[in-house]
Image (tube, grey):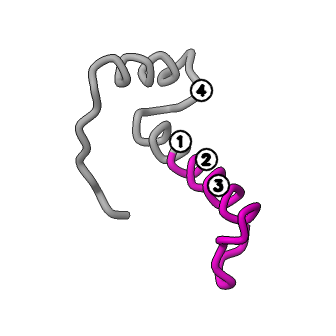
Amino acid sequence: MAKISVEIPDELLADLDRHVGEDGKFVNRSEAVRASIRKTLDLLDEIDERHGRLPDDVEP
Protein backbone atom coordinates (compact mmCIF):
# COMPACT_ATOMS: atom_id res chain seq x y z
CA MET A 1 0.00 0.00 0.00
CA ALA A 2 1.39 3.37 -0.98
CA LYS A 3 1.84 6.15 1.57
CA ILE A 4 1.08 9.75 0.74
CA SER A 5 1.46 13.01 2.59
CA VAL A 6 -1.17 15.75 2.48
CA GLU A 7 -1.69 19.11 4.10
CA ILE A 8 -5.05 19.46 5.83
CA PRO A 9 -6.40 22.65 7.39
CA ASP A 10 -6.62 22.47 11.20
CA GLU A 11 -10.41 22.92 11.25
CA LEU A 12 -10.89 20.01 8.81
CA LEU A 13 -8.54 17.81 10.83
CA ALA A 14 -10.42 18.66 14.04
CA ASP A 15 -13.71 17.70 12.36
CA LEU A 16 -12.15 14.45 11.12
CA ASP A 17 -10.88 13.64 14.61
CA ARG A 18 -14.42 13.87 16.00
CA HIS A 19 -15.21 10.75 13.93
CA VAL A 20 -12.09 8.78 14.90
CA GLY A 21 -11.39 6.71 18.00
CA GLU A 22 -13.31 4.56 20.47
CA ASP A 23 -16.48 6.65 20.24
CA GLY A 24 -16.09 7.40 16.54
CA LYS A 25 -16.96 5.65 13.34
CA PHE A 26 -13.33 5.02 12.32
CA VAL A 27 -10.43 3.32 14.07
CA ASN A 28 -7.88 5.86 12.89
CA ARG A 29 -7.39 8.83 10.57
CA SER A 30 -6.13 6.66 7.72
CA GLU A 31 -9.32 4.59 7.70
CA ALA A 32 -11.42 7.76 7.73
CA VAL A 33 -9.51 9.28 4.82
CA ARG A 34 -9.66 6.07 2.76
CA ALA A 35 -13.42 5.76 3.36
CA SER A 36 -13.94 9.38 2.35
CA ILE A 37 -11.92 8.95 -0.84
CA ARG A 38 -13.85 5.79 -1.77
CA LYS A 39 -17.20 7.49 -1.18
CA THR A 40 -16.19 10.58 -3.16
CA LEU A 41 -14.95 8.50 -6.10
CA ASP A 42 -18.15 6.42 -6.07
CA LEU A 43 -20.23 9.61 -6.17
CA LEU A 44 -18.15 10.98 -9.05
CA ASP A 45 -18.61 7.71 -10.95
CA GLU A 46 -22.39 7.96 -10.46
CA ILE A 47 -22.37 11.52 -11.78
CA ASP A 48 -20.22 10.52 -14.76
CA GLU A 49 -22.51 7.57 -15.49
CA ARG A 50 -25.60 9.81 -15.49
CA HIS A 51 -23.86 12.11 -17.97
CA GLY A 52 -22.60 9.28 -20.17
CA ARG A 53 -18.97 9.99 -19.32
CA LEU A 54 -18.06 6.69 -17.66
CA PRO A 55 -15.43 4.77 -19.68
CA ASP A 56 -16.50 1.32 -20.88
CA ASP A 57 -13.82 -0.43 -18.82
CA VAL A 58 -15.04 0.97 -15.47
CA GLU A 59 -17.90 -0.67 -13.58
CA PRO A 60 -20.09 1.63 -11.48
- For the residues labelled 2 and 3, the Cα–Cα distance comes to 5 Å
Indicate the quadrant where residue 24 lies: top right
Q: Nearer the viewer, residue 51 or 44?
A: 51
Say which of marks 1 and 3 sits in front: 3
Say which of marks 4 and 1 sits in front: 1
Image coordinates for residue 31, horizontal then vertical, percent: 48, 41
Indicate the quadrant where residue 9 lies: top left
Mark 4 and mark 1 lie on one chain; the one further toward the N terminus is 4
- The three-letter amino acid code for the residue at tag 3 is Asp
- Please give the residue where the numbered disc 1 appears in the rendered image: 36
Which segment is the magenta one? 37-60
Mark 1 and mark 3 lie on one chain; the one further toward the N terminus is 1
Image coordinates for residue 52, horizontal then vertical, percent: 72, 71
Helix, strand or loop for disc 1: helix
Callouts 2 and 3 close, C-beta under 8 Å: yes
* Residue 28 belongs to magenta span: no
- The three-letter amino acid code for the residue at tag 2 is Lys
The residue at 48%/22% (across/down) is 21
Disc assigned to residue 25 = 4
- Please give the residue where the numbered disc 2 appears in the rendered image: 39
- The three-letter amino acid code for the residue at tag 4 is Lys
Helix, strand or loop for disc 2: helix
The residue at 48%/24% (across/down) is 20
Image coordinates for residue 46, horizontal then vertical, percent: 71, 57
- The three-letter amino acid code for the residue at tag 1 is Ser
Callouts 2 and 1 close, C-beta under 8 Å: yes
* Residue 39 belongs to magenta span: yes
Q: Is residue 38 left or right of residue 14?
A: right
The residue at 64%/79% (across/down) is 55
Disc assigned to residue 42 = 3
